[in-house]
Image (tube, rainbow, N blue to C red):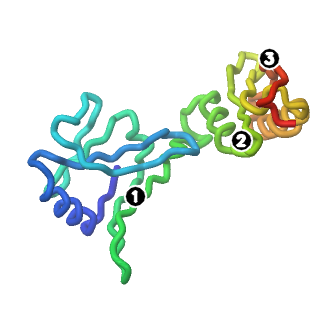
Amino acid sequence: MINISQNAQEHFTKLLSNEPNGTQIRIFIVNPGTPSAECGVSFCPENEVEELDIELKYDKFFVYINKDILSYLKNSEIDLVIDKLGSQLTLKAPYAKNNFSKETSSSLEEKIKYFLNAEINPQLSMHGGQVNLIQINQDGIATIQFSGGCNGCSMIGLTLKETVEKRLLSSFPEIKKVCDDTDHLHGKHSFY
């Protein structure tokens, strides 16, 4: 699950010795499964242990993790890197941003949502826009919706056909067509 190096365990033990009795370690992820996922480590006082937490026992302390994010922490490593300039605690979580692959049981909808967030939305965000998946019907038609600067943009037809649809169709053979369900209203928010 989570490999904590001996150096990191000793570091945690030293840090916890300065905290109130019963304080342990918490590992968390903000926005798990998205391109903006951020991992972190914090102190966990006794009164902040939650019902959905699981407890991992290490030599001289416990680590608490919300069970809903366990799959995102697969093959994670925590280490204390020491060099001439000092020391730094590192947390590597290779599945924090994407805990599935095309071979896993993740649904087609989950894979497409991740693909849009990771591959398409970073480009659209440069113009203040984004695209979201609304649904996929049984005929393989994906319905999407643009928002932000994309809503009402004079280039939306080109963006739909040449960026979103072309890339979705080539990446997901299950998708036969992409439909835009956005009510495009021109306004000051639109990018022209």
> Reading the chain from its start, which is encountered first: label 1 or label 2?
1
First reached walking from the N terminus: tag 2 or tag 3: 2
Which residue is at 40% across, 38% downward? 69
Q: Which residue is mark 2?
A: 125
| The C terminus: image quadrant | top right
Is residue 5 among the parts visible in the rendering?
yes
Residue type at tag 3: Asp
**x, y percentage for residue 93?**
44, 53
Furthest residue toward bottom = 84
Q: At label 2, which amino acid type do we have?
A: Ser
Which label lies toward us, 3 or 1?
Answer: 3
Above/below status of 107 relative to 166: above
Crowd band around label 1 with a 10 angstrom C-alpha radius: few (<14), some (14–19), many (20+) = some
Please tell me whether residue 21 is drawn above or below residue 132 in the rendered image.
below
* Residue lying at 25% horizontally and 48% vertically, measured from the top left: 43
Q: Where, by quadrant of the figure, is residue 104 drawn?
A: top right
Callout 2: SS: helix
Residue at the disc numbered 1: 91
Say what secondary structure mark 3 lies in.
loop
Circles 2 and 3, Cβ within 8 Å, touching? The answer is no
Q: Residues within 10 Å of mark 3 (few under 14, many from 20)?
A: few
Residue at the (35%, 60%) spot, across then down: 78
Q: Residues within 10 Å of mark 2 (few under 14, many from 20)?
A: some
Q: Nearer the viewer, residue 3 or 144?
A: 144
Image coords of residue 62 (percent x, y)? 19, 48
Q: Which residue is mark 3?
A: 183
Cα gap from disc 1 to disc 2, whole angstroms: 28 Å
